[in-house]
Amino acid sequence: MEIALLTYSTRPRGGVVHTLALAEALARAGQHVTVWSLARGGDASFFRPVDHRVTVRLVPFPDVPGEDVGPRILRSIAVLGAAYADARDGYDVVHAQDCITANAVGDCLRTVHHLDTFSTPELAACHEKAIVTPRALVCVSAAVAAEVAEGWGRTATVIPNGVQAGRFEAAAGPAGAPARQRWREQLGGYVLAVGGIEPRKGTLDLVEAMALLNRAEARRGRPATRLVVAGGETLFDYRDYRARVEARAAALGVQPLVLGQVDHEELPALVAAARVLAFPSTREGFGLAAMEALAAGVPLVTRDLPVLREVFGPAAVFAGDPAGLAAALLDAVDEAGRATADGARRQAAGRALARAHSWDTAAQAHLRLYRALG
């Protein structure tokens, strides 16, 4: 089959990671796959190398100083749509991975990674159209598919994400020890959050929880555990939210270290060296970064959401408010320093869960859907 997968950026966000891994798995299955993306800000390639069997089509998308989110969304749709139309490539399957690309190419199927509520009119319209108009929808969890059914009356095919578990298992093993040690020497003991500082990632609650955690550690005569935040590439302007987070962190005496985008080859060791991965998102579709942490054997503390209960089950500790997050993080930090039966049980469950989520399995499920759609 000739398959086009479309994503909105070359930079590491969950949907982009998904697109590349799925494309490579489809290529391993003998399909001809082309990945289309906007190349923002002069990007000449994706954030990581892509299997040579996958064709990459990058559409230049220069930055416009001072451009607001709404006009940027409309320009993204127009630029990608024009390039795609001009190419006149004949594909058996056109599969958009986000609302921007679904709006750009028209007739397609679309993966809904998660649902959100937007106040920017252009983005809200993009989100709505990209659920209503595609010929078929895919969701990465049953919880998101249920939201789609309830809100729009559409039935989506559920195909869970895969995870490159081997990369993260290796980083946690003997061969990965030097890289883990480098991160620990640089950062000390740390709680890791992946995804940047933004409302959907629950960063304000995490800062509150870290303050409570550090007070508890001080009472025990232990040094504070650092909060490290990785990632955060986004189209949206979260400066006001980041300012609120920074002000609250300063008031509470929490000093987050924001790494920004971490090199693809360095990320597994950063994850594997963490005492715990904190995942307090308020909305998610699956939780790929959390699944990567489980592959590395790192304790996972996540917000108590139905979708995350569905995906992670007995492999995670679930919490609601900042006090609950703090208590769960403290327990996880304690478990990182000493073996416990509960910790060992969750670690084994997490590694088994990550291994069970193969991109090759996900690719076969996509192929069955593609063939059924004709």
Image (tube, rainbow, N blue to C red):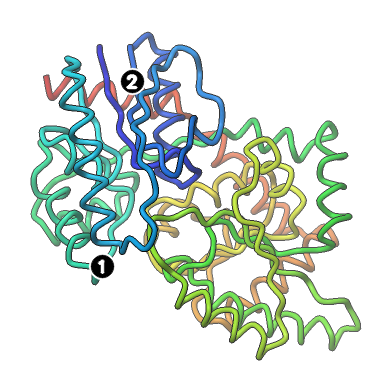
Corner quadrant of residue 353: top right
Q: Residues within 10 Å of mark 1 (few under 14, many from 20)?
A: few
Q: Name the spot of residue 302 as percent of width and height, x first.
A: 54, 64
The spot of residue 280 in percent (x, y) is 52, 68
19 horizontally vs 291: left or right:
left
Q: Which mark sits nearer the N-terminus, 2 or 1?
A: 2
Q: Residue at x 23, y 29 (%)?
A: 83
Q: Amino acid at mark 1?
A: Thr
Amino acid at dot 2: Thr
Name the residue that disc number 1 marks.
Answer: 117
Q: CA distance from mark 2 to mark 1?
A: 31 Å
Residue located at (34% from left, 38% from top): 7
Residue positioned 58% across, 75% down in the render: 206
Q: Residue furthest front?
A: 65
Determine whether the residue tagged by mark 1 lies in a helix, strand or loop.
loop
Q: Nearer the viewer, mark 2 or mark 1?
A: 2
Give the left or right position of residue 30, taking residue 124 as reference. right
Q: Which residue is mark 2?
A: 34
> Hey, which quadrant is residue 8 in on the image?
top left
